[in-house]
Image (tube, rainbow, N blue to C red):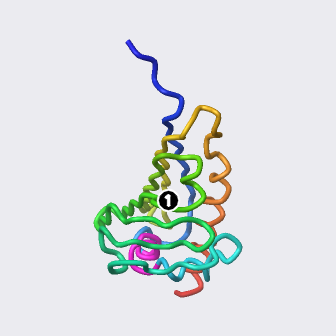
Amino acid sequence: MAEPSSVLGKLEIEVEIKASAEKFHHMFAERPHHIPKATPGHIKGCDLHDGEWGKVGSIIVWNYVAKDIIEAVDREKNLFKMRVIEGDLMKEYKNFVLTIQATPKHDGSGSIVHWLIEYEKISEEVAHPETLVQLLTEMSQGIDEHLLTEE
């Protein structure tokens, strides 16, 4: 039996936010170009390269980060999935997929944002992307603050 490859990996993060799951999902699915306003220290810009905002197959360019293709948008589950197709990450990873799902908290106030990162490193020497934990946590918090000021 073959041993599992150490070049494949998963990283999961959960961030508690005050905004609704629907609003958080809507920010990624329909208004990703507003994310730089919410997280200016992390994302400098977001442009639609091809397709339509919120449509599977559309290509989004996150300035200074990556170019992604939208693989899934599920409004009922507040789920958004994108695959990195260009950018610095592709120097170290063969595959890099981010799935973001926001779910309402059971007590009815706020949401939990669940980030799932699935990746395949180009070699065993490449580090696992733990540095993204702080970035995605801070981005989630920045988006949350932005959404709350819109209310």
Placement of 124 over or under 127, stated as above or below: above
Where residue 139 appears, as percent x and y from the top left, is 61, 66
Q: Residue at x 59, y 66 (%)?
A: 65
- Judge left or right: residue 64 versus residue 75: right
- Judge left or right: residue 141 versus residue 8: right
Where residue 35 appears, as percent x and y from the top left, is 55, 77
Region rendered in magenta: 23-31
Count of numbered tags: 1
Q: What element carries label 1?
A: strand
Q: Residues within 10 Å of mark 1 (few under 14, many from 20)?
A: many
- Judged from this view, the residue extending furthest toward the top is 1
- Judge left or right: residue 143 versus residue 59: right
Q: Which amino acid does label 1 sit on?
A: Val
The one nearer the camera, 32 or 104, is 32
- Judge left or right: residue 71 versus residue 124: left
Q: Does 83 appear in magenta? A: no
Where residue 127 appears, as percent x and y from the top left, is 65, 40
Q: Does 26 appear in magenta? A: yes
The one nearer the camera, 47 or 149, is 47
Placement of 38 over or under 83, stated as above or below: below
Q: Residue at x 32, y 62 (%)?
A: 72
| Quadrant of the image containing the N terminus | top left
Q: Residue at x 43, y 68 (%)?
A: 21
- Judged from this view, the residue extending furthest toward the right is 41
The one nearer the camera, 107 or 124, is 124
Q: Which residue is drawn at 68% across and 50% down?
A: 131
Q: Name the residue under label 1.
A: 113
Quadrant in which residue 99 is drawn: bottom left
The one nearer the camera, 145 or 58, is 58
Q: Is the magenta stretch mostly helix, strand or loop?
A: helix
